[in-house]
Amino acid sequence: MSRTKLVLTGNYASAYAVLHSRAEVVPAYPITPQTTIVEKIDEFIETGMLDATMVRVESEHSAMAVAIGASAVGVRTYTATSSHGLLYMYENLWWAANARLPIVATFVTRTLGPPWNIWSDHQDFMTLRDSGWILFMVKDAQEAYDLTIQAFKIAENPDVRLPVGIAYDAFVISHTAEPVELLTQEEADKFLPSPKAIQPLLDVDKPYSIGNLPKADYHYILRKNLWENILDAKNVIREVGKEYGELSGRDYSSLVEEYECEDADTVFISMGAMAGEGMDAVDKLRDKGYKVGHLTIRTYRPFPDHEIKTIAENAKRLIVFSRALSNGKGGILYDDVASTLYREGLRMETYDIIAGLAGTEVSEEDFMKIYHDVRSGKLDTGKSIFIRRGEYV
Amino acid sequence: MGEVIYPVTEPGEGSAGKTGNWRWQKPIIIIDKCVKCGLCWVYCPEPAIYLDKMGYPHVNYEWCKGCGICAHECPSKAIDMVSEYE
């Protein structure tokens, strides 16, 4: 059986990845722009293509509660949400991580209200930054498909055992169709064997309780253990990405995607859909002889400190684009990068660009304008700079 | 790679030790009134009530925290809650 290439939206690509991963339980509550993922999965179930149970819950909080129960008995579990749904799910998202349950979820990023807004913004996703979830942000439908399959393998690794989230921008990726190459079911089955029930919590012959009252000293050790495991997961992500690359021809052995960074004196850093505009801007600036590169943060947690350090050592300045803002502090991705530089003992020009908030478009012209304004000394290093459709605001 | 530690506990003595000394009142079962329905045994959250071969309930005072749920549920009012301090 040969591989097929279909024209799929990001959401349908995610649904096909769940089909090929043979997820067994999918509890979900609909919210724009996530809805078409779980609609498609339901279609797979109803037409007999996927042997899974869709649990129609009354809220996102319940969706994650069902996911926790299913995953705790060793069943491969998937769900998806966005924006206010993600925040409604929030308590149980942390519970899933601390209970060490290998749930996989897709988070289609969408602006938080009020006012009401369905367009993309990374603020909802960034609330998971410290939760213990392994977090990816992808920039096209193919990556959404590829990383969702890898996510199950990473989550279920006995040295990791953490939930994994795959995020991408509302509509720009979730509802935009593009060609996606799919694995055959045989290939997917070989790459991703059935999950092993490492902790069968509801086994009546070997009863456990999960999340019981501990002493504080013991709880501290659990927290430290999760910290060590999520850092060690960097190597698992690289190994799984390499294996997937050998299978599919699309390599994921790095936590980041470097574009023209080798000899660059200036490197843009961004994540999600806007990375595509960043790379287009690099092409145009390179045509004019400027030594510019772009670094896409694909693995957001654990954070790619080593990769950023390597880029920073060879560059003069980093321009970081954040689509989410820590109110009262600055661009969230910028602060991540700046703290990595400080911890690694590196001092350099860094620029904090806040772009694309509330779903405003970020264009290659924005990247080029920022580049020229940085080079002519118009912008201050370390200050949060807000740009909206080519204008500073 | 490090091992994964799960927040999981097997049945056994809790990390807080024997909890009977948390109690300020204790359940006293009046066997003459007991109808052996077993509701006290079902509802005890610890569980610190066990049933003997005849089906009569008894309290394990090493673990009973004195919450009083058994007395509340007992349909024949066969359980009295008695202060530990009088």
Image (cartoon, coloured by chain):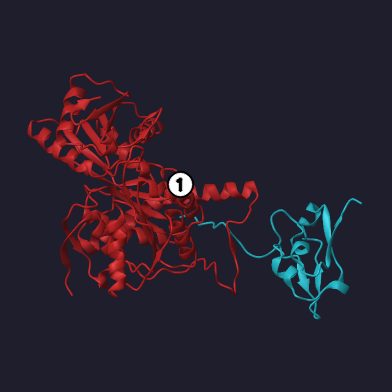
Chain colours: A red, B cyan
Quadrant (top left/top right/bottom left/bottom right) for the C terminus of chain A: top left
Q: For the view shown, which residue lies furthest in the bottom direction?
A: B54
Q: What residue appears at the point 36 percent right and 31 percent down from the top-left corner?
A: A338
Q: Is residue A161 visible?
A: no
**In screen coordinates, is A359 left or right of B84?**
left
Q: Which residue is mark 1?
A: A131
* Total labels drawn: 1
Q: Is residue A11 above or below residue A25?
A: above
Q: Position of residue A257 (x, y in %)?
A: 24, 46
Q: What residue appears at the point 80 percent right and 54 percent down from the top-left corner?
A: B23
Q: Position of residue A88 (x, y in %)?
A: 44, 49
Front residue (pair A329, A81): A81
Q: Is residue B81 above or below residue A329?
A: below
Q: Label 1: state its secondary structure.
A: loop
Front residue (pair B21, A195): B21
**In screen coordinates, is A65 left or right of A278?**
right
Quadrant hosting residue A29: bottom left
Amino acid tagged 1: Ser
Which chain is home to disc 1? Answer: A
